Image (cartoon, rainbow, N blue to C red):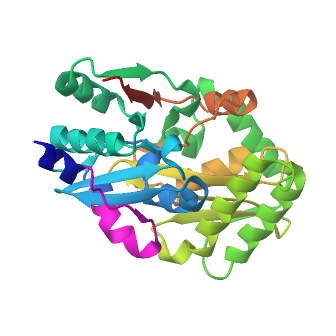
């Protein structure tokens, strides 16, 4: 028994690189979660900031976040292997590091599995600030219906006020996305705010690798000047995830317009769009709720108690 536990503790984690996309995506594509944390693009974007690494063992993928053992958190194991055995592996690994096992971004269905398989071994902590906002794509492409009447008014005003056009991101206009990002940074004090600075690093990482990643995006122009851009990718068969959405706010209604263009141009083949979490920012929460999500996806924390 001790030998088995020792072997389980020997998870060999490595840094996430572009060359790992096929290996990691094999596991991600097999799951049905619509949650943004289960996206290779997001993992790659934030891995240098969060210290995200991965390991494979017995047909399962293990994702660890954190630079130091005392900061380690894990996604629930992914794959078609034995989930209970994978959890035993994580428990053994945590014991080998002398840390308490903490799972993050736990979908509701995994929460049920943990309760069924592990009994009362886990304490579950609500993490509302991290919940994702899921929308019907068609609603965002049209802003139809009474509940989105305000968004439709923003679009009508935008179209009446500005000479505009939207283009799918390609090699000829990718630099215009960086121009918008630079101006957004200037407006939001990227250098003075560590959180915004980290986000900008993650954004730039995606833009620099845009044509090597499974992403699509839109850049919006007003009077031939780049005014907004957005980038996303599929996270399940029916859901498109919006990773980045930035705009120059002097253009009234610009965020409503860039959201609509993403829904029309890049997400047209999907039923849902995930516009990710609000991180507890009240202004951002109000904005995301104003687009009338069809569901708010829970992803809580599970702490091993034994």
Q: Which residues are magenta?
A: 9-26
Q: Name the residue located 80 percent from the left edge and 69 percent from the top edge.
A: 179
Camera-side residue of 4 and 299: 4
Residue lying furthest left: 1
Is there any visible trace of residue 115 in the rendered image? yes
**Above/below status of 226 relative to 69:** below
How many callouts does the rendering have? 0
184 with respect to 6 (left or right):
right
Task: Measuring from the top left, give residue 191's x and y in whole percent.
Answer: 85, 56
Q: Name the residue located 17 percent from the left edge and 37 percent from the top edge.
A: 84
Quadrant of residue 120 within the rendered picture = top left
**Above/below status of 138 relative to 120:** below
Q: Name the residue located 77 percent from the left edge and 62 percent from the top edge.
A: 181
Camera-side residue of 90 and 177: 90
Quadrant of residue 48 within the rendered picture = bottom right
For residue 212: magenta? Answer: no
Q: Name the residue located 40 percent from the left edge and 36 percent from the top edge.
A: 103
Quadrant in the picture for the C terminus: top left
**Above/below status of 261 relative to 167:** above
For residue 16: magenta? Answer: yes
Task: Measuring from the top left, give residue 243's x and y in whole percent.
Answer: 57, 53
Task: Measuring from the top left, give residue 205's x and y in whole percent.
Answer: 62, 68
Residue lying furthest bottom: 172
4 with respect to 264 (left or right):
left
Task: Measuring from the top left, give residue 257's x and y in whole percent.
Answer: 70, 49
């Amino acid at each position: 028994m001790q030998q088995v536990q020792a072997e389980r503790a020997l998870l060999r984690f490595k840094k996430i690189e572009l060359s790992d996309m096929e290996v990691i995506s094999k596991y991600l594509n097999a799951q049905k979660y619509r949650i943004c944390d289960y996206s290779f693009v997001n993992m790659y974007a934030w891995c240098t900031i969060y210290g995200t690494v991965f390991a494979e063992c017995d047909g399962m993928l293990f994702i660890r976040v954190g630079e130091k053992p005392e900061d380690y958190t894990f996604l629930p194991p992914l794959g078609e292997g034995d989930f209970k055995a994978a959890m035993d592996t994580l428990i053994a690994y945590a014991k080998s590091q002398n840390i308490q096992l903490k799972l993050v971004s736990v979908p509701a269905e995994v929460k049920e599995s943990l309760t069924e398989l592990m009994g009362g071994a886990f304490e579950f902590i609500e993490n509302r600030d991290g919940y994702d906002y899921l929308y019907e794509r068609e609603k965002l492409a049209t802003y139809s219906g009474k509940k989105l009447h305000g968004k439709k008014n923003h679009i009508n005003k935008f179209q009446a006020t500005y000479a505009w056009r939207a283009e799918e991101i390609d090699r000829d206009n990718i630099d215009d996305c960086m121009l918008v990002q630079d101006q957004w940074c200037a407006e939001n004090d990227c250098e003075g705010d560590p959180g915004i600075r980290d986000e900008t690093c993650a954004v730039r990482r995606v833009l620099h690798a845009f044509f090597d990643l499974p992403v699509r995006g839109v850049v919006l122009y007003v009077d031939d000047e780049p005014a907004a851009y957005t980038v996303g990718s599929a996270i399940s068969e029916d859901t498109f995830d919006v990773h980045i959405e930035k705009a120059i706010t002097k253009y009234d209604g610009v965020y409503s317009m860039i959201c609509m263009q993403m829904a029309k141009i890049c997400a047209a083949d999907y039923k849902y769009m995930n516009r990710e979490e609000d991180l507890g920012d009240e202004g951002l929460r109000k904005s995301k709720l104003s687009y009338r999500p069809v569901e708010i996806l829970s992803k809580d924390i599970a702490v091993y108690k034994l």
